[in-house]
Amino acid sequence: MSGRGGRSETRWAAAILAGFAVLALVPLAAPRDDVLNFLLVILLSITLAESWNIVAGYAGQVNLGHAAFFGIGALVARTLWIDGTPIAAATAAGALLATLSALVIGVAAFRLRGAYFAIGTLALGEISRTTVGNVLAEISTLPTATISTYRLTHRYYVALGLAAVSVAVVAALARSRLGLGMEAVREDEEAAEASGVGALRLKLTALALSAALAGLAGGLFAYYHISYYPSHPFSPHWTFDAVLMTFIGGVGTLHGPVLGAVLYVVLKEYLAVRWVDFHLLIFGALFVAIVLVLPGGLVQAAARLRGAWRR
Amino acid sequence: MTVLAQQLVLGLLIGSLYGLAAAGLSLVFGVLKVLNVAHGELIMLGGYGAFWAVALLGMDPFAALALVVPAALVLGAVLFLGLFGFVMRADEETRIKNSLLIGFGLALALHALAVQLWTADERSIPTPYGGAVITVAGLSLPVVRLLTLALAFALIGALHLLLAHWRWGQAIRAAAEDWQAALLTGIDVRRAYLLAFAMGTALAGAAGTLVTIGYSISPSIGLEWTLKALIVVVLAGLGSMLGTFTGGLALGVAEAVSAAAFGGPYREVVGLVIFVVVLLVRPRGLFGR
Amino acid sequence: MLEVQGLEVAHGDVRALDGVSLTVGAGEIVALLGPNGAGKSTLLLTIAGLLRPRAGRVTWDGEDLRRVSPHLVVERGLAMVPEGRRLFGSMTVEENLALGAFAPRARAARERSLERVYALFPALRERRRQVVRSLSGGQQQMVAVGRAMMTNPRLLMLDEPSLGIAPRLVDAILDSLVDINRGGVAVFLVEQNVRAALALAHRAYVLEQGRIAAHGPAADLLEDPHVRQAYLGPFGR
């Protein structure tokens, strides 16, 4: 896990946001549903990956229950929205509840270290999924009135805005004292604690930020899909996707998760035509290779190649 | 009352397979300090191995064990040499974390592979004994599941004896207790690790076979079984295989009780809640002695 | 037989051994003295192969041991009793001893080695079915020495065998080393109890801050003013 200083992160943030500005023109230039849907999935994945990256890359904690925050955001936003709350307020409420639950879960789960935190959060995520699946077994479908006014472009711009916010948040975090403190905790928790860094407070802040972004992404999911099972956004595969994209791109960097998300979705779409889950086979193998030989992901590989080129 | 008793009996029957599933995980974790979260996927592969042995070779389902277990042993050795062996140099905390990540990637890859090979459908093996049922005191006991319980217990017993009396079994225990001291007594610790990992995989293969015979499998059961095995390991601690087996039975019974009290769909939740509570009460000393 | 040349070992950035050279010949008893933190344990662990040197070499019968895995060092006849005994506490005395005879060469001589260990420490025969953790410190040390002897060594290295043991049993342990040596096994002993160590050793080295500060026949070192002042005290302790 490589923590670069704030300066290069800011430059990357500027480049990525400039790319997003270009994407804002797509609905005008090519207003095709398949293009917009494809880009929307990429943008949603970027948000999800960046949100997971805050806890894993900066605070060094592998959270395998991330889907719970995404799910809570989706559940609250969908319920309130269908009841008549404006979607913006409903999404905000969802993100707020996701953040609050992160604080509650965090106080308990951060008693666990390393791999135990990972399996503990995995279990918590599964508890939330099973419970939601049991209580709300019925499929959730939008009212016909809402469907008749459904505009994909609206969803697209929300996704674009969210991805931009998540990139900006991580960029700001990387430059801040808060981010530095998190990196100190990641490198050596005891040493950080000894030098006066409040490790628990920092880890909780990271988890809350991460949950807030995941909750917003859940709100987008609720806004985007016409019908789905309420337990679906709680499914562990949302967590696993975020883990894969972040690690393969480069955990603890700003642009790694963006790169990972683009690659992941493109490969998935490309392979889905012939092989259902083949992209997971490739990504699973790639992930293992990266953990073993290239812990910095593709970002690190690129840096090494550049270094070799200059020499 | 009989309904509850019947549920408890069925809980014990499935619990024996939880115990068998957990034994492999416990062996690998206790000896190598490697947390293989792909253990459930190895169980799933074992199940499909048995499915193939029956469907393609026309073997008796229980006899398929004789094919699946050695194959899993080899697979385990390959996985250790190709993947998990590389994390053994790191200190314990890094080792557990990296092994978790490797297992995670392996789980995804194996799941995807199984979907390609066998489709996402649920499958089970029809046995010649079919739906035969023994009735004792008003309780109906499916013969096939009784046999899986007996075999699970026999396998655990065999493992226990191997670890207690076999030369390399003792070496595995010594390496688990103090690997440096084991090296200083002339034990090839790396080979002991290889053996322990291969045996853990073989146990997963056996568990998968029995699950497929008594119940059913699909490519997506991996995570569920990994969690079950983890819950049992947390409940029973490390070190005693007979203890692990008892822990499996306990989980089966706890699930049955919770299903009776809160309704069937909550069967899965009780184990996870136990797991989280135990983790929180003993955040560090959990897997220690 | 054992030859150490210019050995340098570091723990991270901290240099523990800084150019140590010494030899142990067949049939010798050699003591290694020195204050805490001088690098004595580091030296033994490096010879056994558990630590890798930064520079210098360890040779055994002319063979370079630097690339030999620790369990094969044992197989070549070089055994070690580590500091703090490091027994397999949940196993019985018998099981611990059996594990000592794990490697092929040791296994061939297993029955004879076991008789020899029980002859050295008759108390162990009575307690052979007892779990090691339930034994006293002195008895555990006997098991540790016994387990190392089960590997059928030609050189036995011991790191502080008298540490944390009742004085009555210290003598028994140190006496056993003389018996072991009479049986043809060389002994390389790290020991806090300098007077006792020099009493039974033929030769000794003094290790200070990672370097050999003095060496010579044990009798000479006993008279050496520096050794007397630093390790035996003004009144000869």
Image: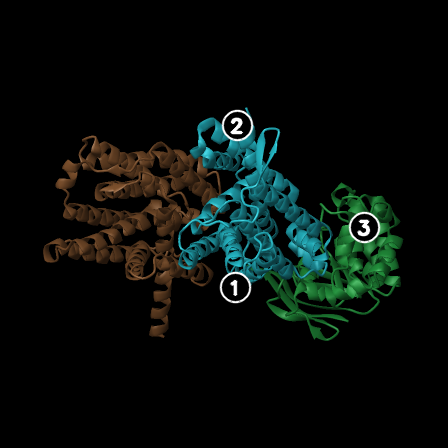
Chain colours: A brown, B cyan, C green
Judged left or right of residue C156, residue A173 is left
Question: What chain letter is assigned to the residue under label 3?
Answer: C
- Mark 2 surroundings: few (<14), some (14-19) or many (≥20) residues within 10 A: few
The residues bearing labels 2 and 1 have C-alpha atoms spaced at a distance of 49 Å
Residue at image coords 40%, 47% = A59
Q: Tell me, for residue B3, which label it has, or none.
A: 2
Q: Which amino acid does label 3 sit on?
A: Met
Tell us which disc is closer to us: 1 or 3.
1
**Which residue of the protein is positioned furthest toward the top in this rendering?**
B1
Res. C24 visible in picture:
yes
The residues bearing labels 1 and 3 have C-alpha atoms spaced at a distance of 41 Å
Q: What element carries label 2?
A: helix
Q: What element carries label 3?
A: helix
Q: Tell me, for residue B82, which label it has, or none.
A: 1
The C terminus of chain B - image quarter: top right
- Mark 3 surroundings: few (<14), some (14-19) or many (≥20) residues within 10 A: many
Where does label 3 land, which residue? Answer: C142
